[in-house]
Image (cartoon, helix red, strand yellow):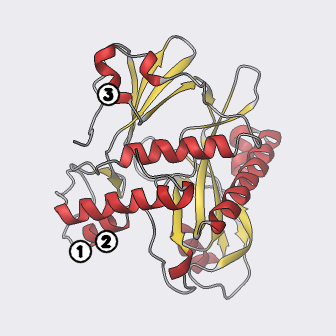
Amino acid sequence: MALFESQIKSLPRIGKGKVRDIYAVGEDKMLIVVSDRLSAFDVVMSDPIPDKGRVLNEMAAFWFERLGHVVPNQLTGIDPETVVAPEERPQVRGRSMVVKKLKPLPIEAVVRGYLIGSGWKDYQKSGKICGIELPKGLQQAQKLPEPIFTPATKAASGHDENITFAQCEKLIGAELAAKVRDTAVRLYKEAAGYAAQRGIIIADTKFEFGLDKDNNLVLIDEVLTADSSRFWPADSYQVGISPPSFDKQYVRDYLETLDWNKEPPAPKLPHDVIERTSEKYREALQRLTGKKLS
């Protein structure tokens, strides 16, 4: 049965996001449990997606390890099953991490390699994304000459808002903004190069960073998962159309057929939409890492 919401009683819960539940482990660490909840159009669906949390957790762990040489990350190496009560271990098995408690930066470090989503809409209006001038005549889903850093603010509720690099500098300082930009672009390039060998295009992704007590930059949250990235199968990619992707596409497509105002409560999802979405998440994990869920 899919885990919809964790019920850890042995640790204090300090946060609940759309997908993740966060618990304190002492003063300086946290347990992050990835549920099977799915949000679409910033609304959490009433139906969980089987195995989604395990897929996201395994995918993030894979990338944290693979990209550890680029920038330090939040992982502690502590087995999550050792920090909860014995009867709670099945709740955290395969879907959680014990991480360092860090000071998160108030921005999302978005890197785009292709022209799609809100970036495509902005380009159509202004020829720019986040103030960055792009060549004229680009088409939807076209590869950009070089990946671009397009930061966004983190919205407590509602949609994140794209900002310019100058606004990012005002929020976190010029030196740190440059370091975040350069690190995020390098992470994207390394991941995109690897994924291309596995037949997957990473169109765009968002990274989150925090600072440790010595103000060192640390990669936090999730990294290069199907929730935080746009993955396209290379064999069906075409310029000029929005390619199929390994994420919530089946859910979004279904919701677009309904007379729903995209406000809570979310409509029920049909069984076939739930199953197909679950399959897509599992397929993304297998194609990227070569591993099936245990």
* Real-space Cα separation, disc 3 to disc 1, in angstroms: 37 Å
Q: Is residue 123 above or below residue 83?
A: below
The image's mark for residue 257 is 1
Instruction: Name the residue rendered at 27%, 38% in the picture.
Output: 3
Circles 2 and 1 in contact, beta carbons < 8 Å? yes
Instruction: Name the residue rendered at 77%, 21% in the picture.
Output: 214
Question: In terms of secondary structure, where does tag 1 sit?
Answer: loop
The image position of residue 153, as x and y in percent, is 57, 47
Residue 246 falls in image quadrant: bottom left
Instruction: Name the residue rendered at 34%, 52% in the picture.
Output: 39
Instruction: Name the residue rendered at 26%, 67% in the picture.
Output: 255
Q: Amino acid at mark 2?
A: Asp
Residue 270 falls in image quadrant: bottom left
Q: Amino acid at mark 3?
A: Pro
Question: In terms of secondary structure, where does tag 2 sit?
Answer: helix
Position of 232 compared to 165: left or right?
left
The image's mark for residue 253 is 2
Give the farthest residue toward the right: 175
Q: Amino acid at mark 1?
A: Thr
